[in-house]
Image: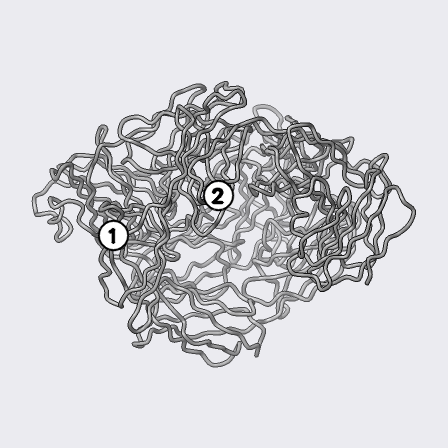
Amino acid sequence: MRRALIGVVVLGVLVAGAAWFLRAPPPAGTDVATAAQPRPLPEFRAVDVRAQSQGLTLTGLVKDPQGRPVPGAEVFLASSVQASINTHTCGFCQEPVLGCPARETALEVAALLGSGRGELVAGAHTTADEKGAFRFEQLAGVSFTVWARAAGFGDGVHERAAPGDPVEIYLPPARTITGRLLDERGQGVAGRVWAVSEHLARYLHVEADAQGRFALQSLGEGPFAVLAEAPGKLPVLRAAVEAGGEALTLRLSDPRTLEVAVTQGGVPAEATVHVTGDHLDRMVVATKGLAQLKELYPDQLSVTAALGAQASAPQVVTLTELTTRVALELEAGGRVAATVLDEAEAPVANPTLSLLSPAGEVLHQKRAGTGELVLLGPVAPGDYLLKAEAEGFTAVTQPVQVKAGETRLDLTLARGTVISGRVLDEYGRPAPRISVLITPTGDSVHADAEGRFVAVVPSPGQYGLHAHHSDWGGGELTVSAPKSGVELQLEPKAGARVVVSADGKRIEGASVSMFIDREGSFRNDRTSGADGVVLMRGLPPGKYTLIASHPEFLPAERQVVTINDGQLLEVTAELRAGAAVSGQVVDTSGVPVTGASVSVTPRGAEPAVTDADGKFSLSPLRPKGIYALRVVGRGLEQPERTTAVAGGEPVKIVVRRQPIFRGRVVSDGKPVRHFRIDEHEVESSDGRFELPLPATEDRVIFTVEAPGYEPLVVDRPRVPDLGDLVLRAAPKLVGVVKDEQGAPVADAVVGCDVCEQQTRSSEDGRFTLAKPPFVSEFTVVARKGRRSGSAVVAQLDDSVQLSLRAGTRVSGGVYSADGRPQPGVEIQGLQAERGEPVSVVTGADGRYSVDVPPGVYRFVVATPGQRGSEDPLAQIVQVGTQEVVLDFGLAPGSAPVVVHVRPQRGFALWLVRGEVTAIGNPPMELLRSSWAQLVYQPLSERVVFPGVPPGRYSLVWASFHAETPGGPAISRVDVPSSAEVSLVR
């Protein structure tokens, strides 16, 4: 299901009694419940760094950018475990709060800055001597943040300093961030601007003048998070700002107000209004049926209301105006009563359940106790999604149709195979927020603030764990899953110290990437400071390709460097100056277009967003390079191609605004509440919409789709009001889900291979599913836990019975070309009828075992050394009810088969068990063979099937997608055989 929501403002009147509310604000003297942003601020407790007895000693030097001592510098020390705004994470996305991209997060950051909470508090303080040396004694702890300041310099910081290690703190030249605060109309506005270094939680602020101009001076090591606030405006937060760069433009939004009228049978109702959005979750009681939510950003929100057993349907609104009014009508609501069980029908420990709207908005969420019956709601009757997740299990999302009253269901979670442990630095200290790469699957997880990580892997087997931090080092470990208590320690290994400069000046904010064959790529975790240095530690020794980059420069020339274990290689990289493409976006009336995204092709710079005057600038780009410009925005069309020369004259791009159309989507006289019009996803309690749509001078043509209904192609005269768009319910397929003993199965999830909609079987195992359009047959699939069943259904069929059964065991081994077992290799499979993926990893002995539903599968093993342009050999096998043994590679008792072909684009070579006499052209039926091997589009004239069991086989050489002139080439071969086969005509 497409879940991207495009803004829809639905201002239709839900009941006649609420109409007055949508036309005018509440009368003076009317009691209105209001909700601003109640944001409880976290507590930041100081950590004592002084030992009661002797303790530890930490010494170091304070230096200027040229490496000379800075006498008299003030030096401060705090424990590395001291919490600050830099360690505080967003409660919604778990990203660092200063780097969270959601606009709502700026409110929390503004509250922290204004209260002084979260600023790093020094536990000790000293002064550097005449040689710039400092000394802290009687310390308790293993790791500290040490920072220094001196007149004429910015603050310098050394993170995770350990007693006994030499500590050097470089003070950068004092630098400045300049810029301007603007309102939504592009006018300057007075306010306050804060800056916080991403490495040192020290709060700095300055006042912007009446024109909005500001200059944050005496800044040290960055990059910085910059927050701007002004009276009567919402704060704005900008992350990763470099000091000394281009002037900032910070646009502050006017706060929006959402007014909600709630009625029940036309009478005002004191219901609880629930508003959710991007990083937003607020509730307020509608006093006398009216509620106000203030201090909102101009974003898209979902609004619902509930009172006792009554509830309203979700309504999506976009707050474009300063005040948006919504009317909600309560109806008999329902609750979901759910329990979460494992496959043995035992309660799952502490699951989290979320009830979602069809578009994926979280309406209700609860973390439950073990075995607890969880009640979620009330919500208006309709189709929703229920998600269950728990540590150590694979998360499940399934449809639920809520009816008035209580809808009871059980969710079954499949237990996952888990690897868990901690990431430690070279001193044994927890390494927070380190990415842990799992091979061979390529998945990754992040350690938490204490260095703990939990990874759910596809199956038992041998896995490689790889952790890396460019400052602290790298570590790798091979484990057999499941495994707990893993300690993955970072070590310095090989590395490089890269000094990045431009025009002879060291550059702050630069990044470095290093690539090595077979090992992959490594990137820095921290950009360069004022000294221009990027550390790349913890790398495997070898030959690397090194690239330095920066958002404001063209990348440095590629370098090939060789690093050895225990060595920190000194490397210099020179960035190149780039050019910019600038211009203005206007509509056909010459009015500037604000908020449109402008990008260039070929891509050389990140897309830019037009400002209040429609202006944009894209850089860095190759000087004098010719680029095509593309404008993207809701309701915008770019009729003509526009090109520009980097460094040349500004360009003007003219776009056409799509006309706005409104209407209502209904079926059988009732509103359809969730539907899609072209790419616009709509949630509307009364089925109304108001959208920009592409149109010709006299016609508008678009498609309306909704789960459970036939698609509707609308072709009407171009008039603003399109009236009612009537959808017809799709033909229904009824069925029943049973187990192997013939007993009905409740709460099985039923869908099909081409269906957008899913449903759930009832207590008696029965279900109803809308048939998909435009197909003659489709595969219906039912699942519950690891049990599943499927059947192919013709469009003319009206009913089906599905039998759930446990999977069939498929086992075997993976072998190299010389017959050695291959541990830690991933086997990927795809079930042909259902399109369901399968993944399993071999153990230390090179063997694997997996249970899969019956059907025809295509398995592949990505072997080391496989050319990226060549598809790996695919193994096709039909799995029935009996266990299947399937080996890959040169297994014991097997033999290779060598075939000569003339490589052709789109051709495939098949090795099929048994004798093939008559096949199609192209031979697509071979994809459903009981046993076959396939090489698609081989690049070499000599193709080797590495391991084939003894027997008689047929070789087929043919076009995979189209007819082969003269028909497919077929040849028989007996295995084992010493002769090589030629299919060259």
The residue singled out by tag 1 in the image is 688
Tell me where residue 960 appears, x and y as whole percent: 67, 56
Please state if 171 lies on the left or on the right of 766 as rendered: right
In the image, is residue 744 above or below residue 610?
above
The extreme right residue here reads 978
Left or right of 445 on screen, residue 215? left
Asked if one can make out residue 804 in the rendered structure from this viewpoint, the answer is yes
Q: Which is nearer the eye, 918 or 855?
A: 918
Q: Looking at the figure, which quarter contains the C terminus?
A: bottom right
Can residue 167 be seen from the camera position used here?
Answer: no
Q: Position of residue 244 (x, y in %)?
A: 50, 63
In this picture, residue 19 sits left or right of residue 62: left
Residue 649 location, x and y as percent?
Answer: 47, 81
- Of the numbered discs 1 and 2, the one sitting upstream in the chain is 1
- Pick the residue in front: 513 or 835: 835
Q: Residue furthest bottom?
A: 649
Specify few, some or many for label 1: CA neighbours under 10 Å numbering under 14, 14-19, or 20 or more: many
Residue 212 or residue 464, whichever sits in front = 464
Q: Secondary structure at mark 2?
A: strand
The kind of residue on which mark 2 rests is Ala
Q: Are marks 1 and 2 in contact (CB under 8 Å)?
A: no
Query: For mark 2, what is the residue?
Result: 794
Nearest to the eye among marks 1 and 2: give it: 2
- Locate residue 116: give its quadrant: top left
| Residue type indicated by callout 1 | Arg
- The circle on residue 655 is none
User: In the image, is residue 548 above or below residue 478?
Assistant: below
Residue 340 in picture, x, y percent from top left:
45, 24
Which residue is at a point 86% across and 44% down the rendered structure image? 974
Q: Badge 2: few (under 14), some or many (20 or more) residues near its Cα, within 10 Å?
A: some
**Residue found 29% across the figure and 76% down from its top:** 589
Q: Residue furthest front?
A: 918
